Amino acid sequence: MSTKILVVDDDSNICELLRLYFEDEGYEVKTASDGAEGVSYFKIYEPDLVLLDIMLPKKDGYQVCREIREVSSKPVIMVTAKGEVFDKVLGLELGADDFVVKPFDMKELSARIKAVLRRYSAHANQLDEEVIKFENIEISLQKYELKLCGKPIDIPPKELELLYFLASNFNRVFTRDQLLDKVWGFDYLGDSRTVDVHVKRLREKLEGASDKWTLKTVWGVGYKFELLQ
């Protein structure tokens, strides 16, 4: 089955150029001309990767990226005419996997797509229903066991469940309320700051384990388990 790419850009010429180029490379390509259409197509089309412009009508690329990350960890590459550091940082903080500035070279963009897809596939293939593995970390939900560098680490059940949930949805940002719902349950009546406390304790346990991943705070939003390389 062909790898599916969703292009979200309000420039019809760019959409057509990307569609022709990547179909010629063997990809299946769908295009959307605004942010709302992009979100809708993502849910229907279920692409393997999204090329996402920032300056879009109806919903900008940042909002589209947020909504994609609420439901999926599939790769997102931001494509934009803006080259300021702030735009790149915000896009990456929201969960984008890469950032390409217009005008771009098609061969370079193709190489970036292949690299991101390889990286995603390598990590996704490590996941199963019970055990998650990344460099120097292994999380078993069945055994309620955390291993760092091959050594078991004492960890309370709720901390392990939180870490497992974030790591199984790597590169996706979750708010405190979302984490309370997913990890503690809808009937939890405690303070949302309990999430902060658990994340702080997890960081103390995970400190120095690897430079390939981190438990990251996305200021003003929440937390994510981020793959760095």
Image (cartoon, rainbow, N blue to C red):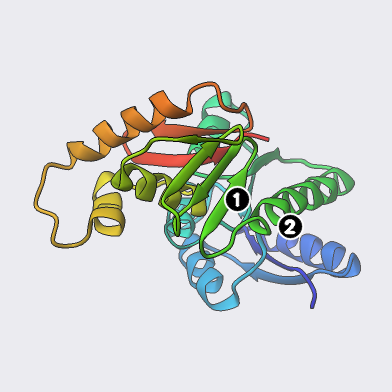
- Quadrant in which the C terminus is drawn: top right
Q: Which residue is mark 1?
A: 53
Q: Nearer the viewer, residue 125 or 224?
A: 125
Crowding near the residue tagged with mark 1, few <14, some 14–19, many ≥20 C-alpha atoms within 10 Å: many
Vertical comparison of 9 with 96: above or below: below
Location of the N terminus (image quadrant): bottom right
Q: Which of 183/67 is in front?
A: 183
Q: Secondary structure at mark 2?
A: helix
Which mark, residue 65?
none
Circle 1 SS class: strand
Is residue 27 found left or right of 35 in the rendered image? Answer: right
Task: Please tell me which residue is depicted at 13% across the width and 61% down the height of the picture.
Answer: 187
Is there CB contact under 8 Å for labels 2 and 1?
A: yes
Disc 2 crowd, CA 10 A, few/some/many (<14, 14-19, 20+): some
- Kind of residue sitting beneath label 2: Ile
Q: Amino acid at mark 1?
A: Asp
Is 93 left, or right, of 212 in this rendering? left
- Position above or below: 4 against 53: below
